[in-house]
Image: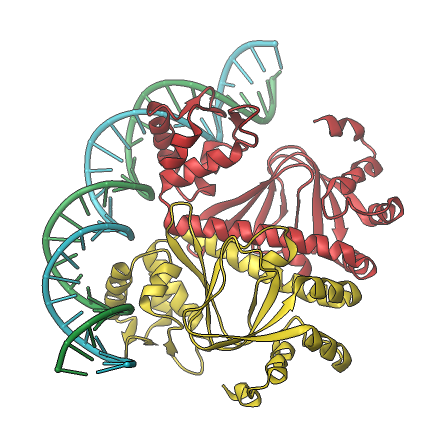
Chain colours: A red, B yellow, C green, D cyan
Amino acid sequence: MEKNKTCGHRHDQHKMCVSLVPIFNHLEVDQMKEIMKAAQSVAYKRGEIIYHAGDESDSLYIVSRGKIRIYRLSESGKEQLVRILQPGDFTGELALFKEATHEAYAEAMTETNVCMIQRTDLQQLLLKYPSISLKILTEFSNRLDESEKQTTRFATEKVETRIALFLAESLADPARSNELELPMSKKDLASYLGTTPETISRKFAELEQQGYIKQKSPRIIEILDLDGLLLV
Amino acid sequence: MEKNKTCGHRHDQHKMCVSLVPIFNHLEVDQMKEIMKAAQSVAYKRGEIIYHAGDESDSLYIVSRGKIRIYRLSESGKEQLVRILQPGDFTGELALFKEATHEAYAEAMTETNVCMIQRTDLQQLLLKYPSISLKILTEFSNRLDESEKQTTRFATEKVETRIALFLAESLADPARSNELELPMSKKDLASYLGTTPETISRKFAELEQQGYIKQKSPRIIEILDLDGLLLV
DNA sequence: CGACAGGTTGACCGTTATCAAAGATCGTGG
DNA sequence: CCACGATCTTTGATAACGGTCAACCTGTCG
């Protein structure tokens, strides 16, 4: 929120987002400026598609304002929400390094601004500043690990457990507050967790009835018993 | 098989595997030699653990001979098989770039030889030869994409479809032969596909009865109707 | 030849998807 | 800023899918 105040309507100011991204924020001021020069700011309206499967789009997208839904279609055509990007997050990386097209869809959930960096520009930068590659490798490692963990959860845990784990992880700092705001609708959450809205609704009701959580509003959840929740 | 002939008992010869790995095989002979110097050859017996979750092991492991099972434990303690490494494949990458411990287990399925490269050595090499980073980034991109695709399958497809997709993809070259050898036992396959041996057994029997496949032996499957299989 | 792991088959039941319909919420345009 | 419509959410009834338990079979290897 606060950081958006520094973003006016001029494109250059949106490029500030470059400095917020973990893969760049270790650089010198000069190097940062060089990257911002390669970046280009673009705005999307709610519902607009930023890229879609089959797209040859070859840019890195860094979110400076708004939210982006990343989703995939399975072989049988069902949609799954893969992640939600918030300001500071980036996407497009897959099309950057593999000579192939996107396999996912990116859609603006609200008014959204992104900084784009072209593949060719980025590759130049990577060869010039190898430390950026190490940062991106670190980011990829983490994401790969996350993705495999998620796969293992789908493979071995039942829906109720997946929900409990999701809630526990969403509670960023249990010491500070035990309230959390869902980053997406329950419909999207269902898609993210590989289940249906009906099941989400019922499981939330169950967890509430058992005294583990309290639904203060559709999007605000209070965790009453974190330990109990994790034993579900 | 063929390539193992070049590997004798001396360690240096096992290091040849370095040249077989896609992330290195674009390099000059001199650079390759430099990498081999940093590599160290190690042998494991069937069942031996190469690394395990919580391990601080910080090496890249390249398989030169044998097979390695990579598996994870879910929060509730259930095991899932993540992948099987064959000669030329590598692992350990996750612990290389994130300052954290392994979250997976690696176990030798047979007599296995691996080349290890220490994290510090590798990072030196990456900073010296940025093109290696680009190769690794490409490899990571592909694996990330694979992993997300797998997650989406677990989230949206039923067991029967996951089996059908697995079989279709295992059939490397449909034009050449429609027979395939399962790279693992059906028990492991069940774990890999997030189901149980009983269900695997039943679904295979169903697919056979419907005329899509023929089980010529426990490990050899003939695909009789690939298109039909994919419509399951 | 016997032991043991892997594989198969049957019966049963728990979990979750599906269909349907009513109710709440949110974003948009006036 | 409010009201409308679209979309999300909830709840119920039903059924399919797949997991579990148990028994038996099979192949492999010492």
A201 on left or right of A52: left
Residue at horizontal 48 percent and vertical 34 percent from the top: A168
Residue at horizontal 74 percent and vertical 64 percent from the top: B126
Residue at horizontal 77 percent and vertical 55 percent from the top: A131
B190 on left or right of C29: left
Number of callouts = 0
**Where in the figure is residue B225, as x and y percent of width and height?**
33, 72
Q: Quadrant of the C terminus of chain B?
A: bottom left
Using the rendered view, name the quadrant where residue B188 is placed.
Answer: bottom left
B149 on left or right of A102: left
**Where in the figure is residue B143, as x and y percent of width and height?**
56, 61
**Where in the figure is residue B211, as x and y percent of width and height?**
26, 71
**Where in the figure is residue B169, as x and y percent of width and height?**
44, 69
A207 on left or right of A82: left
Using the rendered view, name the quadrant where residue B163 is placed.
Answer: bottom left
| Residue B208 in sight in this render | yes
Q: Would you place residue A107 above or below residue B220 in this image? A: above
Using the rendered view, name the quadrant where residue C9 is placed.
Answer: bottom left
Please tell me which residue lies in front, A53 or B62. Answer: B62
| Residue B223 in sight in this render | no
Q: Would you place residue C27 above or below residue B87 in this image? A: above
Q: Would you place residue A103 above or below residue C15 in this image? A: below
